[in-house]
Amino acid sequence: MPVYEYQCEKCKDVVEVLQKVSDDPVEVCEKCGGKLSKQFNSMNFHLYGSGFYSTDNKRKYLK
């Protein structure tokens, strides 16, 4: 899932939100209640887990 950045117009705080492409944009700042605007930059994403190695997805019976 992509990570989007929003900036509050009132307190200028920048928030990163992990959301689906089809999700509605976040509109209200949780800290001050101000209006959030989506920032346009290179899209970020997070990789979770121990990493991508040749041993990660091998089935046991293929050995």
Image: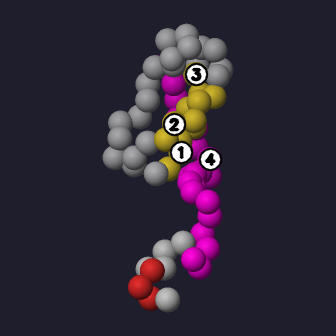
Asked whether, in this view, residue 60 is left or right of residue 7, the answer is left
Q: Secondary structure at mark 1?
A: strand
- Pointer 4 local density, CA inside 10 Å: few below 14, some 14–19, many at least 20: few
Residue drawn at point x = 61 percent, y = 60 percent: 50
Q: Is residue 9 above or below residue 15?
A: above
State whether residue 52 appears in this view. yes
State whether residue 34 appears in this view. no
Residue drawn at point x = 44 percent, y = 88 percent: 62
Q: Which residue does the numbered mark 4 point to in the structure image?
A: 41
Q: How much space separates mark 4 and mark 2, taking CA atoms?
A: 14 Å
Q: Which residue does the numbered mark 3 point to in the structure image?
A: 8
Q: Secondary structure at mark 3?
A: strand
Residue drawn at point x = 49 percent, y = 74 percent: 57
Q: Which residue does the numbered mark 2 point to in the structure image?
A: 17
Q: Is residue 38 above or below residue 31?
A: below
Farthest residue, direction top: 32
Marks 1 and 4, the one that precedes in the sequence: 1
Q: Which residue does the numbered mark 1 point to in the structure image?
A: 3
Q: Amino acid at mark 3?
A: Cys
Give the residues in magenta: 34-55
Q: Amino acid at mark 1?
A: Val
